[in-house]
Image (cartoon, rainbow, N blue to C red):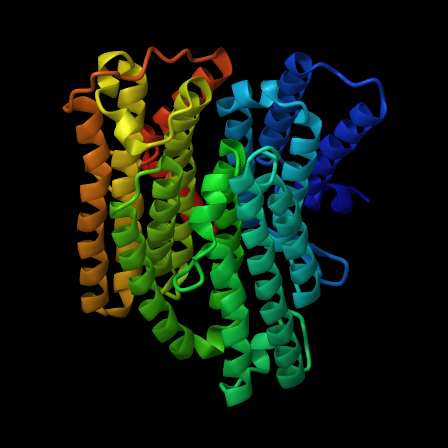
Amino acid sequence: MREFLILMKSEWLVSAIIIFLLIVKIGRGIKNEWLLPIIQTLLLISLAAGFLYNEEGRLFDGMFRTSSLISFQKSILLLGVYLISLLFSDWLKGSAYLAEFFILLLSALLGMFLMISSGNLLIFYLSLELSTIPVAALANFDLELKRSSEGAMKMILSSAFSSGTLLFGISLLYGATGTIRFDEMPYHLNGSTLEVFAFVFLFTAFAFKLSIVPFHLWTADVYEGAPMPATSFLSVISKGSIAFIFINVLYHTFQPLQNTWYDLMMVLAIATMTIGNLFALRQQNIKRFLAFSSIAQVGFIMVGMTSNDLSGIDAVVYFILIYVFSNLAAFGVASLISTQTGMEKISDYKGFYEKNRLLCWIMALALFSLAGVPPTAGFFGKLFLLSAGASRGNFIFITIAALNMIISLYYYLNIVRSMFMEKNENPVEKIKINPSANFALIICTAGILLVGLMSWIYRYITELS
């Protein structure tokens, strides 16, 4: 019983919060001003518990497995959810469905936890669906907005298609290997045409969830239509969880097919970085801009995944930790502006520095980190991704990735230039920052500045792997 509770502590704690919120809804309810701090406190307790009593083990005949690295990955996702609860506290307190929002969000997080710990294809598929269906509802949380409904519909249709391809790939893989267990499958793979065909279908499902080109077409519309907290969750937490399970499946389950998936990953990484960057150049809406920015970032994550050794796992986990701080800082500032002024166009950020100097510097640091400008943490994150990708000696591939970093630098710095240097006859008025959002922005800023400079964090990740 002790092993059962310890190994699944993250799942139990998140489930307990969900049950608490259901009881609140069944009862007389609690005002948002009181309920939100309670949720934030429970999330913080769950986050702290994620670093205690981490053991390696398996449950349910190997269907559920965990380790210190997996526990750390879950802690990164939980940290992101905690920051979201702080950053968007104004929007959350003003929502008439606060409890429902967190029930959906935490249900999706629970699915992500189970997905990362899945030991076979059955629990992987079920947990993937659990992590996807609530997010589609979150995307449609602004019921009065037509674009929100349109975005949610596109996400549901895309998710349904990706689930169908995943199930077809699973059935082919089971027929070819005779097993659905991740740890047994490598011993049955021999690179046959049927196995490669099955892997392509599985890869397609992952590509939809990660917004890998050409399976990215739903991303910008969903990001634009969803409320800012849901967009942040999609951009950071959802993509991070898929990246964690994806790299594990590639490096362990499909190790015998590494030559096949390396070529596929290399081609799609180049396409994802390039197309994400080119489309980000022409965006005028801040949500759509961050959507294509996240697509480009996925391309860089794929560069690290091509390593096929422990350095790739270390680089991806380290980068996603940095990505949580950087992207949520950018979304947090954009949300404060959108909530208080209704402005979502990039052109509205002209002259932002005149009356909002603190927020302007936070946004600039976040964009510098996403661009990979030293000495921000994003520079070190992308350096390790490129170093991991270069371990195979394909320097043309790494050169293309480096050139894409230069392209991304242009559109990130373009926003910084607009905020600091351009004049605006009607600049954004002084933005009020509530204490919760202010605390979250401090955490994000500290993460952007310190995670890259504190080398022990990367060493800690390498020790876990």
Left or right: where 423 falls relative to 143? left
Q: Nearer the viewer, residue 223 or 134?
A: 223
Q: Residue at x 63, y 17 (%)?
A: 37
Q: Position of residue 95 (x, y in %)?
A: 62, 23
Q: Looking at the image, can residue 166 be seen?
A: yes
Q: Is residue 291 above or below residue 84?
A: below
Instruction: Please give the name of the residue rendered at 65% of the width and 45% of the height, measured from the top-left corner.
Output: 134
Q: Residue 465: x, y in percent?
A: 47, 53
Q: Is residue 327 left or right of residue 36?
A: left
In the picture, residue 188 is in which quadrant?
bottom right
- Res 453 visible: no
Q: Position of residue 283 (x, y in %)?
A: 30, 43
When asked about the image quadrant of residue 445, the answer is: top left
Quadrant of the snapshot with the N terminus? top right
Within the image, what quadrant is residue 357 found in? top left
How many numbered discs sit on the rendered protein?
0
Depth check, front residue: 128 or 384: 128
